[in-house]
Amino acid sequence: MSFTQDVKRELAAIVPAESHCARAQLSGLLFAAGTFEIASGGQYTVRVSSRLPAVARSVLSLLRPMGTHAELRTADTPPAGLRYEVVLGDDPRHLQVLNEAGVLSDSFQVQLGVPARIVARRCCRVAFVRGAFLGCGSISPPGSAVHAEFTFESGELADDCRRLLARLGLHFRVTTRERNSACYTKRGDTAADLLAVIGAHTARLAWEEHLVFGEVRGRANRLANCDQANAGRAARAALRQTETFRALMAGERWASVPSALRSVANLRLKHPYLSLPELAAKARPPLTKSALNHRLRRLEALAGETPPDERRPERRRRLAT
């Protein structure tokens, strides 16, 4: 079961209470998933086709308050497979419903664009976009590369959809392909907002939940990598110090080293794997991390082995002009 199907099942259960919103949602479905056939005698047949029975039931639920009883059929043809079709014939009431939904003009001509009267209200624009998503929408599952899309056969419809989405604060783009046109976005926040706007709140929560888990997982990985890098640097520093202090002890300068530094050198040789805070706690009396680090660096300086990353470049005098 795909994430898009989950979203459509959730949206299919939404039947607007207001007649103008129900008409707009039906209009979105008809423009997005409707196939218009005109016979030689001028008779109209409209088929709304979907792979999901929930979408077909949604079309029937929107038609029922309009006093229209459409025919429900199933078709199993390759490569589409099993599909559910709601068929509106050349009945006068069917034609009237298609005119009310903006699909047919007053002269019963097929409309190529979305009539402004259908989406005059904001609630109707939301309902139209919801119907369009039920008919031709898709969205990638949480965790994969973001892609939300409305796929239309007509470039004019794709551009109308883009403008409607922009009026809802959702910025999509349009691309033209060989067989269709798509109104799409690849932005995660825009795709998530689309789900919220059209009423797919459960899907939006699933999307947000994955984003939160992803952020926590990424932060944990960054902290783990940081800890690993710090541990590696500490281990290399401790190895360098033990080798340096052994060489210092074997030389003549060891006798002139102050006793406080000698005790720190012996402490490092005794505990080569401890970090600075742990090593500082072993000192008697205990030292602060800063004090211990200062003494270790003094020992390395005495041995002439100050590490390159701790050497400070000589300051150059600025020439007076």
Image (spheres, rainbow, N blue to C red):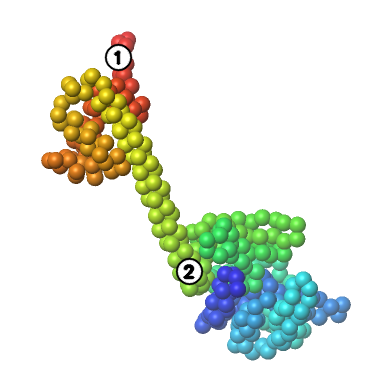
Quick one: quadrant of the C terminus? Answer: top left
Horizontally, residue 78 falls left or right of residue 303, namely: right
Which numbered marker is on residue 196? none
**Residue 66 rendering spot, x and y as whole percentages:** 62, 86
**Residue at far top of view:** 321
Which residue sits at x=66%, y=64%?
151
Secondary structure beneath disc 2? Answer: helix
Horizontally, residue 176 falls left or right of residue 276, namely: right
As drawn, 195 above or below 16: above
Residue 257 visible from this viewpoint: yes
**Residue 259 rendering spot, x and y as whole percentages:** 14, 29
Viewer-nearest residue: 259 or 228: 259
As drawn, 215 above or below 313: below
Which numbered marker is on residue 317? 1
**Residue 170 rendering spot, x and y as whole percentages:** 52, 60
Based on the displayed image, in which of its 4 quarters is residue 159 positioned?
bottom right
